[in-house]
Image (tube, helix red, strand yellow):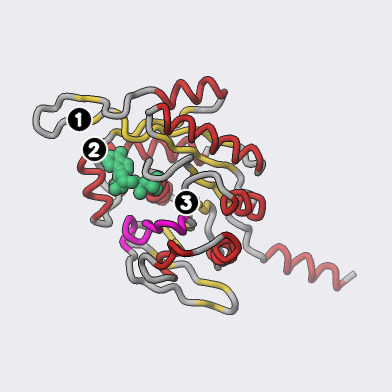
Amino acid sequence: EGVSEVRVAVMADKPAAPVIIAVGSGKGGVGKSTLTANLAVALARMGRKVGLVDADIYGPSQPTLLDTEGVRPEARGEKLVPVQSRFGVSMLSMGHLVEPGKALAWRGPMASGALGQLIDAHWDGIEVLLLDLPPGTGDVQITMLQKHRPAGAVIVSTPQDLALIDAQRAAELFAKGPVPVIGLVENMAGYTCPHCGEVSDPFGRGGVESAAQAAGLPFLGRIPLTLSLREASDAGKPPAAGDGEVASVFAAIAGKVSD
Ligand code: ADP
């Protein structure tokens, strides 16, 4: 009897595994990494203990976005120790492990193995682990979803038709997981001219919201296309860490995701 009591105590001491939330897109360049970084920062500002895995092996951009370029993670035992960004987000990226550009040559099984190491790291104390998935809906993504079973997924798309068709594919990918889709985010809608203030919609507007409605999925929010967002991102200053209008957009999306 004494032995089983000890065992119970040991199990209770084991830290709870973080809730994994995947961020996916049907294709590249729609702002998936930008959204993931800023969601992480917004969640950290809400007091959540947030981790981020940059699984975008074809173009790991999280070290740039969260200003941890050139930092190399240490290993403790067999596992990697996440890198600390100055925005309160613990993180691991393929970009922390390989020389810039080298990751491009990776193929399925090798990539899946390395990605597994990023997820199976020392995430002790982390409540929410955001997963910046590689763009698209290929084998690497399916393997990841089936192996690591995220609790939910956020899909980001730009408003144009083509991107929406791809977002639909992403929704089908998550259904295969099966991973429940938390909702859709529209990015790059409504460009405000920095000179005259006129708002235009280079990629259309509202398409993602109507696609979400048609699919019976929640619409989580709309991120405007802004020059300052792009510049701040490239400079390693996620807008969600600031106090502008865009920061409140990310905070609102983070609120819905963490519910
Ligand atoms: P993905 O991860 O989907 O490939 P990224 O997040 O890397 O896309 O974004 C692609 C490019 O678009 C980056 O240069 C990024 O700064 C820029 N970008 C993303 N969202 C916006 C936006 N709302 N306004 C302006 N630029 C954006």
Q: Measuring from the top left, give residue 78's x and y in whole percent.
A: 59, 77
Name the amino acid, label 2: Thr
Look at the numbered discs 2 and 1 and tell me whether their residues touch, using CB distance below 8 Å: yes
**What element does badge 1 sit on?**
strand
Q: Is residue 59 magenta?
A: yes
On the image, which quarter does residue 181 sit in?
top right
Q: Measuring from the top left, give residue 196's x and y in whole percent.
A: 10, 27
Instruction: Locate the N terminus by quadrant.
Output: bottom right
Label 3, ligand 1: CB separation under 8 Å: yes
Label 2, ligand 1: CB separation under 8 Å: yes
User: Mark 2: few, some, or many residues within 10 Å (few <14, many ≥20)?
Assistant: some
Please name the residue that numbered disc 2 is placed on.
Answer: 226
At a point 57% along the width and 66% down the height, the residue shown is 110
Please name the residue that numbered disc 1 is placed on.
Answer: 192
Q: Which residues are magenta?
A: 56-67
Q: Earlier in the sequence, mark 3 or mark 2?
A: 3
Q: Earlier in the sequence, mark 2 or mark 1?
A: 1
